[in-house]
Amino acid sequence: MTIAPAAPLEAREISRLQDEVRALAEQHDAVILAHNYQVPEVQDVAHYVGDSLGLAREAAATSASTIVFCGVHFMAETAAILSPEKTVLLPDLDAGCSLAASITADQLRAWKADYPGAVVVAYVNTTAAVKAETDYCCTSGNAQQIIESIPADREILFLPDMYLGLWLERVTGRKLRIWMGECHVHAGIRPADIEALTADPGTELLVHPECGCASQCMAFGNGRTQILSTEKMVTFARASEKQRFLVATETGILHRLYKEVPGKEFQAVSERAICRYMKMITLPKLRDALRDGKHVVTVDPEIAARARGAIDRMVAIG
Ligand code: 13P
Ligand code: SF4
């Protein structure tokens, strides 16, 4: 399916829509949560912008009666499982995730049958039905701590991102059984994209572990390569003495980096690293979602009950 990008909005129209969104959010007792990959005008109107882990924690903690999720479908599902008494809205139901689509619950059940007794650790980028078959969920922000919390003698099935899995093997020194899924955006960032750009010793390289180059980048051993979740990229850049950063992840994070770490310079390793699903959420769709109470994301209560434990462990650890 080809998805045409939304036409850019003019500054005046952006500001008018943002005012409308703020007023509607107040009127409907709604909190707007936005992922770091959202378009700048959506990030700027959100009550909270963050990575998958931060957003899940906000969704669990909010006192608002409605959560509008500016992110992708599995994130809204996770919020609906964590806060079943709240209304969770996703401004565009087609905002999916190629990584989450890389494994179904049936495939996971068949994989588990081959390794009885193994502990299943699933990245949060999975459907609720897959989470229901899982012992622990994790995000890029706490995957290492979650693997380390599992007794060393237990076999682990890790899914669905192979690059995150390979990176986890390196940092934890544990052998994992890894599902061969990938995110089309991050898998496309290759070591060759980075090598040419890292010649300058004053530059720090920030790499998301979903990238196709993540575990190779660790081997650079140059002391200026950091493998981080998107939230940790912001914290790291803020605290670092370095002035210049190369960023290997979806380019939406650059807006937050420039906004929250002023005076420093950021460059995307790949300008092509754009998630078309994240970019499906636009200000007009956010306004419509708030105004019309759409699109409500719910999870079958039986699946939600089985997925809840794995998600609670994710929110609690790290
Ligand atoms: P996080 O840094 O939020 O874990 O981002 C990964 C991602 O691709 C979300 O879909
Ligand atoms: Fe999924 Fe990749 Fe988009 Fe994240 S960037 S939502 S993993 S397709």
Image (cartoon, helix red, strand yellow):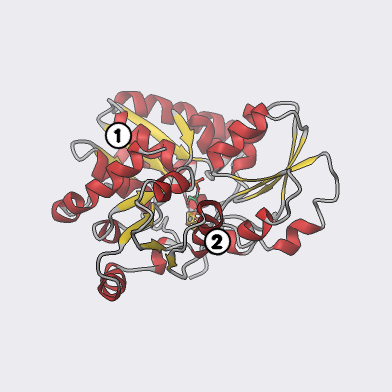
Asked if residue 1 can be seen in this view, the reply is yes
Q: Residue at 27% x, 25% y: name it.
A: 63
- Asked where in the image residue 202 lies, by quadrant, the reply is top right
Relative height, residue 172 to residue 12 (above, below): below
Q: Nearer the viewer, residue 222 or 306?
A: 222
Residue type (three-letter) at the residue carrying disc 1: Ala
Residues at badges 1 and 2 in contact (C-beta under 8 Å)?
no
Answer yes or no: disc 2 within 8 Å of ligand 2: no
Q: Earlier in the sequence, mark 1 or mark 2?
A: 2
- In the rendered image, the residue lying farthest to the left is 302
Q: Residue at x 31, y 47 (%)?
A: 78
Q: Residue at x 29, y 76 (%)?
A: 114
Residue indicated by mark 1: 60
Q: Which residue is mark 2?
A: 4
Disc 2 marks a residue whose amino acid type is Ala
x and y, in percent, of residue 43 in the image = 52, 35
Instruction: Name the one closer to the observer, 307 or 215.
Output: 215
Instruction: Mark 2: give few (<14), some (14-19) or many (20+) Cα within 10 Å.
Output: few
Q: Is residue 81 left or right of residue 4?
A: left
Mark 1, mark 2: which one is toward the viewer? 1
Q: Return the x and y of residue 93 as percentages of the image width and height.
A: 36, 54
Q: Residues within 10 Å of mark 1 (few under 14, many from 20)?
A: some
The kind of secondary structure element at disc 1 is helix
Residue 11 visible in the displayed image:
no
User: Could you give the CA–CA distance between mark 1 and mark 2, rounded to whole angstroms?
Assistant: 34 Å
Looking at the picture, tell me which residue is in the foreground, 287 or 108: 108
Taking depth in this image into account, of 188 and 71 the one nearest to the observer is: 188
